[in-house]
Image (cartoon, coloured by chain):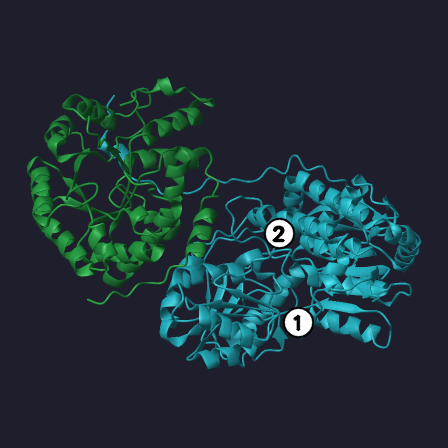
Amino acid sequence: MTPSVETRTSVVWDYAPAPESAEHIRLRGRYGLFLDGDFRAPADGRYVPTLNPATEEPIAEVAWAGPADVTAAIERARAAFPAWAALPALERGKYLFRIARLIQERARELAVVETLDGGKPLRESRDVDIPLAAAHFFHYAGWADKLGYGVAAREVAPLGVVGQIVPWNFPLLMAAWKLAPALACGNVAILKPAETTPLTALLLAEICAEAELPAGVVAILPGDGGAGATLVRAPGVDKIAFTGSTAVGRDIQTALAGQDVPLTLELGGKSANIVFEDAALDQAVEGIVNGIFFNQGHVCCAGSRLLIQESVRDEVIAKLWRRMGRLRVGDPLDKNTDVGAINSAEQLARIETLVAAGEEEGALRRTVACELPERGYWFAPTLFTDVSPAHRIAAEEIFGPVVSVLTFRTQAEAIEKANNSRYGLAAGIWTDKGAKAFEVASALRAGVVWQNTYNHFDPTAAFGGYKESGFGREGGPAGLRPYLRVLR
Amino acid sequence: MIRRLPHVDRVGVEERAAQLGKRSIKATAKQQGICLAVSMLDLTTLEGADTAGKVRHLCAKAVCPAPTMPEVPSVAAVCVYSSLVAVAREALRGTGVRTASVAAGFPAGQVSLEAKLRDTDDAVQAGAEEVDMVISREAFLAGEDTRVMQEIAAVRDRAGDAHLKVILETAELGSYDHVRHASMLAMEAGADFIKTSTGKAASGATPGVCLVMLEAIRDYAERTGRIVGFKAAGGVSTSKAALQRLVLVKETLGDESLTPERVRIGASSVLNDLLLQYAKTESGRYGRAEDFSRE
């Protein structure tokens, strides 16, 4: 019975498929609008299926809000506002704590639904989106009875009814970023989730009901851009907060011009990730990968403009390209998947257009040769070298798994190139020298600067942009300010 | 020689290692991975109380880890002190399992170079096919890189045809910069394998240390074309830990490195956990520790 030496001959060892089970998920076949504390049918009876972008199969039907529904939601919200604002702050905080805990209790379900509806790898929804969403509610729950300290004022008051429009890239997390500070400050909120990813927001509606949040304090109205535009223009809304594209942000600001409706915008970006020659290069490569391939590059602060010091350019590109070959692209529900599906056909088309423009302009394209599923929307991780600052792929937001590499020679040139953008959302600095990191960070016109890391989020840290990346901050005490009036 | 340290970021290394630690290894991947890990084991006993009898028992276990599961392969090598090499060599004759010996003043390395070389001679003359030497941490921490390399080169020379595994004892080096630097010195000086630890220090083959050493191996191969092997030793006591080390190898060096010629796991207690886990994948239920002999 002695095993022979031959049994040791190696096999190619690969991970067996490890799909997270979706069997425990109990989605309704059809979701209404969350209005006045319960799910209700839309006035015009319109339901639209939401698709799984990895399979193009419908998951559930979701009501789309029309103008009449928006008006009704504002009425209910106005009615609910006085009691909610008058509630002792400690009590308001308790509701938020309850919501945070319920998110944690339903974390596994929320993660799977987030992945089904949006195409992001389960690894990310499980380890990033859902825990951070809960953390935001916990954080702002704690602020509810300390608002004055957060904004250095003696007396503050809520604004009233706030309209909030969130994007499809981090559906639940962005809803949490919006709702948690608004509610903590004593406002009532009407949230419009994105057209392609309404499901986790609707589960959050269930959670609000389960937490016995008073009716009307939160309304969740799925719909397309039309519903958002109606909400922005509707009378009776006291504040608008929007996260999404710069084009829509500009439209919203135009619509609100001349009105006494405060606005915060968190828009696009073309963030520079700067690798200096004295960086820990292997970790920098991990940071580059995390910066641009996290969530298929559907990240407003994605490190899509990679600036590498010329002396280490070849080494970094060689390491990056080898590392990209190890990315596991495919079934988002598989626990070993690194890069999932593109969120929608529309977004896929946008990525393809810009990548084609990059090739036409003469940049060198390299795309990982990985097997992609036949159905669904997919785009393999892509690297562009020989990119000039004048190229479209160096200036425009692609919002996909595509990184453009530029080079620089000196620190001054790095700063100049990084700042030479219409946007100013985020930046990354990779260096082992502390003084250099601080010097460069202070010179960058970007709302968030990461040093030796990228795409790290924390509810205690302010997030927001410069220039065409928007204005206003979310997260931390700075995130309270847009939802408060300072009385004295 | 002026020392120029590489840049390694601790936080980044540990995040990446932790991320790879979350790979889900199930079903056939788990069975294959366990067999692969067994085939890479250097089954080790390095105790003052080791005797010829104990070493012979260990050798029998090394050749046929689980008589009830003949599909589980033999381990790669048995590793003992040089005084017991002859016993192991005899017990392993014709089995394909190799005989390894620690040498060069193991584990502290605080003896003269002459003593280290004599130790190596003893091991090789007794029939060791693989020699696991320790580097002089004393020289390394004092910044004397040249002395570290000269010692390795001298032992390399004396070891002749035997495979030389150079133990860095990373727990005593103090930083990942040092781990990477020591890895490079050992490879430049002629190591066939670089090995994390003696198993006698406070910590061993932590995921971060393994990752840094594997990256050094990858970069050295890129530069010179010579592929140096990797041995994780110390602290790998469960199947899960062993499989996680294989994941690090797979995603840093690539599938082609997942062979006993390139990767070893040095351990004494992990084998039975691998067998228990293997049996569980077959039967669907957990067995008991007594299902397999200790040695």
Question: What secondary structure is found at the residue carrying circle 2?
Answer: loop
Which quadrant is the C terminus of chain A positioned in?
Answer: bottom right
The green one among the chains is: B
Residue at 10% across / 30% down in the picture?
Answer: B86
State the hue of chain A: cyan
Q: In this view, does A45 lie to the left or right of B215?
A: right
Q: Is mark 1 on a helix, strand or loop?
A: loop
Q: Residue A119: give its label.
A: 2
**Residue flagged by tag 1: what amino acid is it?**
Ser
The mark found on residue A469 in the picture is: 1
Q: Mark 2 lies on which chain?
A: A
Coordinates of residue A248 in the picture (x, y in percent): 74, 70
If you read the primary sequence from the N terminus, does the residue marked by circle 1 or circle 2 appear first?
2
Give the image location of residue B189, x and y in percent: 17, 56
Q: Residue at horizontal 10%, vertical 52%?
A: B154
Q: Which of marks 1 and 2 is in front?
A: 1
